[in-house]
Amino acid sequence: PFSKSKEVITRLKELDKPFILILPSNKINTQYFRIMKNEIQLIIPKKRIHFDKQINGETPEGWKNSCYFDCFYYCYKMNLKKDIIWLE
């Protein structure tokens, strides 16, 4: 789904509804996020987020639950107390 992040973010912005997305930290540098620079708030986890894969409720054999990149929570219209929140 990260490969479709531009399309997803563009559509969510069009809908103008509050949302929170988990995306790689480097997405903050993209042009489509720069357009929303005054509307996006970030939640930064203390540790790297690791993702689990499920197919029909089962973890595939050989699946490694590790992630080689950092992710942030990108928040739109969530009215958080701060624009950047560092989780402890």
Image (cartoon, rainbow, N blue to C red):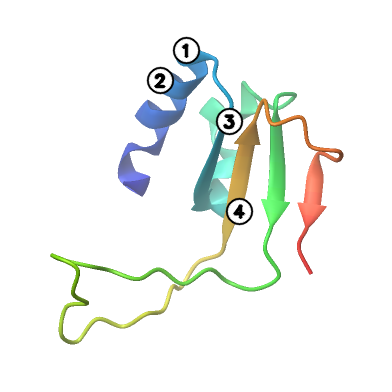
Residue 14 rendering spot, x and y as whole percentages:
47, 12
Distance in Å between CA atoms under marks 2 and 4: 20 Å
State which quadrant residue 59 falls in: bottom left
Question: Which secondary structure, mark 4?
Answer: strand
Read off the residue under disc 3: 33
| Extreme residue in the right direction | 81
Read off the residue under disc 1: 14
Q: Are marks 1 and 2 in contact (CB under 8 Å)?
A: yes
Left or right, 36 with respect to 13, comes to: right
Discs 3/1, front? 1
Distance in Å between CA atoms under marks 1 and 4: 22 Å
Question: Which secondary structure, mark 1?
Answer: helix
Q: Give whichever of 44, 30 is nearer the camera.
A: 44
Q: Amino acid at mark 1?
A: Glu
Q: Give whichever of 63, 32 is nearer the camera.
A: 63
Read off the residue under disc 2: 11
Q: Give whichever of 75, 28 is nearer the camera.
A: 75
Left or right, 83 with respect to 49, comes to: right
Residue drawn at point x = 31 percent, y = 83 percent: 64
Discs 4/3, front? 4
Discs 3/2, front? 2
